[in-house]
Amino acid sequence: MLILYIISFWVGLILTLITCFVGGLGNHHYHFHLGNHSTDFHGGHSPFNLSTILAFLTGFGGIGYILLNNSFISGILIILIAVIAGFIISALLFIFLSKVLLRDESVMKDMDYQLVGTLGTISIPVQLESIGEMKFILHGTTRSIGVKEQDGYMIPKGTKVVILKVEKGIAVVSMFEKHEI
C-alpha cells in the first residue's frame, strides 16, 4: 500500500505542476474513445475535471502515506480516511475554482456575435463603390467595421445604418431611415 500512496501523491503533484505551467486549470474539453464507447470530459464547470482529479490523487496519496507511516490505524481505515480526504481536498479546490476564479466566465455563443441587424453610425463616409467605416456597440463595447452600401451609393458621416450581411469581413449596410416604419 505504501507504493500506491507514494505513486498517487507524486503523479498527482507532478501532473498538477505540469498543467499549471502549460496553462491548464481543468478548463478544457477532452474527448475519449474507449472501444465502442465515446465520452466527453468537460473541465472547469464540472466537479470531475483534470484539476480536481489531480487534487484527489495528491490528497489521497499524501494523507495515506502520512497515516501509514505515523499511526497505528489499520490499512482499510487508512484507505477510507485517505479517500475521504482526497474527496474533501478536490471538493475544496472545485469550490475555489468555480466560486472565485471562474465565476465570471461564460461560454461564447455565435449568436451573441452575429452582426446582421446591428444598428450603427458611419464614422468614415462611404464613397461611390468604396468602403467606409461604421461604429456600433456590441456587449457594451464600441466596435468598428469596414462597410459598403448594398447598392454602391454614398453614405455621409454620421448616418445611421443597419448591417444586412457580412461578406469577407466587410459589412454590407443600408441607411436605417429606409427601413423605418
Image (spheres, rainbow, N blue to C red):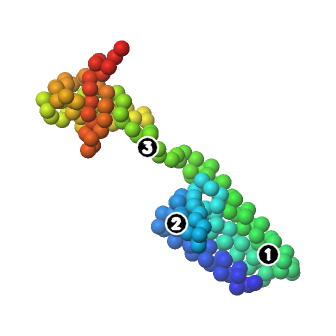
Residue 74 is situated, as x and y percent measured from the top left of the image, at 86, 80
Instruction: Identify the residue at horizontal 48%, vertical 63% (top origin).
Output: 23
Q: Does residue 4 sit above or below 93 in this rendering?
A: below
Residue nearest the viewer, comparing 20 with 49: 49
Q: Does residue 86 sit above or below 165 in this rendering?
A: below
Whichever of callouts 1 and 2 sits on the residue coming sooner in the sequence is: 2
Residue nearest the viewer, comparing 139 with 178: 178
Residue 176 is situated, as x and y percent measured from the top left of the image, at 30, 21
- Mark 1: which amino acid? Ile
The residue that label 1 is drawn on is 79
Place residue 155 in its image quadrant: top left
SS at mark 2 in the image? helix
Residue 20, which numbered label? 2
Q: Does residue 100 sit above or below 29 in this rendering?
A: above
| Image depth: mark 3 or mark 2 in front | 3
Whichever of callouts 1 and 3 sits on the residue coming sooner in the sequence is: 1
- Mark 2: which amino acid? Cys
